[in-house]
Amino acid sequence: MTSSATPSSLIEFRDVHKAFGAKRILQGLTMEVGRQEVFFIIGTSGVGKSVTIKHLIGLLRVDQGEIHFDGERIDNLSEKHFYPVRKRIGMVFQHATLFDSMSLRENVALPLRKHQGLGTKEALAKSDELLERVHMGNFAHSSPATLSDGMKKRAAIARTLAMEPQVVLFDEPTTGLDPVNARRIDRLIRELSDDLGVTSIVVSHDLPSIFGIADRITFIYQGKAYKSGTRQDFEQSGDPIVRQFISGNSHGPMETPGF
Amino acid sequence: MLGDVTISAIGRGTLFAWRELGGITILAGQVLRALLPPRLDGPELFRNLYRMGNRSLPIIALTAFFVGGIMVIQAGVLVKQLNAAGLVGWGAGYAIFREVGPMLIALMFSGRVGSNNTAELATMTVTEQLDGLRALAIDPIPYLVVPRVIAMTVSLLCLVVLGNLIALYGGAFFAMFLLDLEFSTLYYSLVDNIGWLDFVHGAIKAAVFGSAIAMTSCYFGISVRGGAVGVGKAVNAAVVAAAISIVTLDFLLTAVLP
Ligand SMILES: Nc1ncnc2c1ncn2[C@@H]1O[C@H](COP(=O)(O)OP(=O)(O)OP(=O)(O)O)[C@@H](O)[C@H]1O
Ligand SMILES: [Mg+2]
């Protein structure tokens, strides 16, 4: 594996290690994400996909290795210096993380008020538009506590888009959604990249999503990028472990922790 | 003789207390830094002032009213024995303003507002809402903690001032009906003997207790670990820490303040 930075790569992980106590999660992860790419991270549950993307916004810190973003090394930034990075890299969490004390539209309006300098009224008007975009306009006034997981996730996507980030990290955006809404989210991610030039990193187990919209895919296995490539590379791969994952076979050579 | 087990338990407890105290000090430093120049969220501040201050009024008023009554009833026996009706207003006022008012209202406030605050922040932390804020490039200290510290300090100060007045009325009410004292006797006994200093003494205590409750409740809220069980433990630790802080600070302030 080479780690020479091609000029087109926007994000780069170089030999990243991360452990929680004795639990070693990332053990030399190296991967590159190109500009405006829709980049998928796949792998079994608990392998460290969420952990990987949290490093990009400084919610977790590497034990060893480097992370570069747009030509700048970011893994060693202080918490304070991570705030400018967070304005450019938005994240949709696996579990929505909407604020319970606010309605959906207030949730979405928060980054608009804080970062786009909008007044409360304008921010709320714009937040209604964004909620409409994820087909949640009818629930703008609801409290997150009263909504289903899939609905919360869509609202969380609207809130992240309000930041107008250059990169969006989607942690399982279609998990818990029905097929119709899942494909709508896929289309939204694709459009963000094609129309607005946004780079997306999508963590997912959702095969229709992966093979529907991914430009490139990295398969994480045993703490490393086991295989990276295009959709076609994965579809045609003869590697037994990759084949087992994408065919969802419970029997095979893949070792999963806990089994 | 202390057994090894006891000694190591004391050692662990001491280490734990020092670590938490260190954490609270660091948080206090971050809060101060966010205040110079002030960076905080207006809507959050008003929301918290309302729910922490206004919404606490009924319970504080009720407590204060009876506290006034208790002071007078306790004094009543001596008043009868020594025929010292002229001292009741002074005695009750002095005790309420300087000690009983700030202390009891602060403990009440800690139980109602502090514990609620810890539970809310701890729940937000374990459900990743705090990380969610950071991911939106919003620093949780100025956004969440600072408004709460200000709201709790201001609320407790106002509640103590109001509560003291209500306690005095409570005291007067029970003195008139249970001890058969004249309102004017009580009134002059109070205004002739109680000065601004007594009032300010209590007010300073109230503000200090308010910030202590705020710091402990926010600290245990945002440093929680381990899901729903952690939230329960955090609330518990916060209430205990707030009570200890109130009593210790009360002792220090009483010794230092005029
Ligand atoms: N803050 C943390 N402290 C301790 N352990 C953690 C922490 N965050 C994650 N882990 C552990 O790291 C491992 C990887 O977690 P992660 O959430 O990245 O999995 P994942 O690949 O996203 O799985 P899933 O598909 O189920 O979401 C898990 O064993 C998890 O318990
Ligand atoms: Mg995950």
Image (cartoon, rainbow, N blue to C red):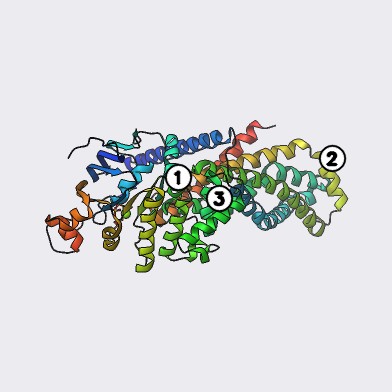
**Upstream in the sequence, badge 1 or badge 2?**
1
In the rendered image, residues at marks 3 and 2 fall on the same chain: yes
Asked if disc 2 is less than 8 Å from ligand 1, the answer is no
Q: Dot 1: within a 10 Å radius of its alpha carbon, few (fewer than 14), some, or many (20 or more) residues?
A: many
In this rendering, position of residue B48 left or right of residue B219: right
Checking the image for residue B114, the label placed there is 3
Camera sees residue A254: no
Instruction: State how far apart marks 3 and 2 are (Cα).
Output: 37 Å
Question: Which label belongs to residue B192?
Answer: 2
Tag 1 and tag 2, C-beta contact below 8 Å: no
The spot of residue B164 in percent (x, y) is 73, 48
In front of the other: label 1 or label 2? 1
Which element is circle 1 on?
helix
Amino acid bearing label 2: Asp
Is the residue at mark 1 from the same chain as the one at mark 2? yes
> For the image shown, how many numbered marks are present on the structure?
3
Local secondary structure at mark 2: helix
- Residue at image point 76% right, 55% down: B170
Secondary structure at numbered mark 3: helix
